[in-house]
Structure formats: C-alpha cells, structure tokens
Amino acid sequence: MVSIIDYGMGNVASVQKALNFLNVKSVITNDHSVIKDSSVILLPGVGSFAQGMENLNERNLVNLLTEEVMIKQKPFLGICLGMQLIMENGHEPYECKGLGWIEGEVQKFELLDLNIPHMGWNNIKVFNKKYFNNLDNSNFYFIHSYHVKTTNYQDVAATVNYGIDVVASVQKGNIFATQFHPEKSQAAGLLLLKTFFDLNA
C-alpha cells in the first residue's frame, strides 16, 4: 500500500487518480499507524515551503516521515513541493529548515527575461536512468517559482533548462523526487510512475 501524505498542501486527489489508473493501491492519509504500515511513501504538494513545513510539523509528521524514509529506508516519491521539502533549507517566503534528507536548498528564480513561475511543458535531460529509462528529452509539466539547488550533483537525476539549468529530479538511495508533476504529464508521466512503482511497490 502507498501512503499519499495528506498535509493540507493540495494535489493529493490528482496523484491518487493517476495511481488508480495504474492499479497501484494507495490511501490519502496523515494517520501515523497507516503510514507506518505502508510500503511506499508519496509526498505531493503545491504551495510555499514554509507553509508545507508548518503543516507537517502541526501533524507531527516530520519525525515520523524521517524515521520511515531515512531509518527504515522505505521507497519515497516526492512531487513538486514534496521534492523541495526534502532539502535542508527553503526560502519561500522566508528562510526555514526543511526535512534535510538531501543536501541543498530551495531558492527563488531570479530571471530577467523569462516569466515566473516556470509554468508549462518542458523537456528534461536525464542523468540517472533508473526511473527515466526511454524518457530522456521527454516533456513534463512544470509549475514553480522556486527551484532546488543541490550540494551533491550526483543526487541530480534530471535537469530542465529555463534560462538556467534547473534540477528537475533528484534520486538518492530509496529517495526519488520530481519538480514536475508526473500525474499531469500524460503518457511520459504515467510511464515514469509505472516504472517507479513496478520497481518499488
């Protein structure tokens, strides 16, 4: 069973709809016992970094998720804000501490000639093909005003160019996350999700 973490930061229904299409059993939950019993943890989310961390703390999920993902090494998938929150620090709308599972921080785009947020379809460049097999240069759907800057480049699974090269996905051990929305990325997104759950669920 996949636990889709419900912490008040949106897009849980669309994520579950994609999993239902793939016949992946999931539950939208913030119940600690359910999360402990799950085989995979999925952290989605849209909105600000600070609000996301506040909501996780209010639900006493920070220590629990860290225990399940970092200590018990359960497979983890983060989507959009869910990727940003696993970094050490964020700056939206002010600096605050993240979950700290991946070394790096989340910074605001500072681009003079491109619209912010970065929104729409963009092709990615793949560096780690474990989950992206046959998906190099595929288009995925992005919407974000802040982007991840990793400390260790080996944690970067894919990038996207939006004025600058931006981290589109990270992977480290049992942790995999995407800045884009695979659940909104049609065939390529569904193939990515299928590959992840075929290997982990």
Image (tube, rainbow, N blue to C red):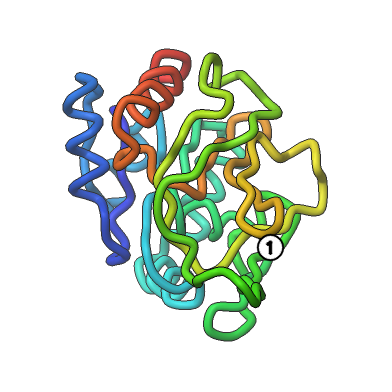
> Nearest the camera: 63 or 106?
106
Q: Position of residue 38 (x, y in %)?
A: 34, 32
Q: Amino acid under label 1? A: Glu
Q: Quadrant of the N terminus?
A: top left
Q: Is residue 165 left or right of residue 57?
A: right
Q: Disc 1 on helix, strand or loop? A: strand
> Nearest the camera: 145 or 43?
145
Crowding at dot 1, Cα within 10 Å, few <14 / some 14-19 / many 20+, comes out as: some
* Number of callouts: 1
| Pointer 1 residue | 88
Q: Is residue 99 left or right of residue 21?
A: right
* In the image, residue 60 above or below residue 159: below
Q: Quadrant of the C terminus?
A: top left
> Which residue is rendered at x = 31% and y = 39% of the image?
183
> Which residue is rendered at x = 63% and y = 20% of the image?
129
> Nearest the camera: 80 or 189?
189
Q: Position of residue 146 (x, y in %)?
A: 56, 68
Q: Position of residue 153 (x, y in %)?
A: 80, 42
Q: Residue furthest front?
A: 113
Q: Residue furthest bottom?
A: 94
* In the image, residue 23 above or below residue 58: above
> Which residue is rendered at x = 43% and y = 18% of the image?
195
Q: Is residue 92 left or right of residue 87?
A: left
Q: Quadrant of residue 191?
A: top left
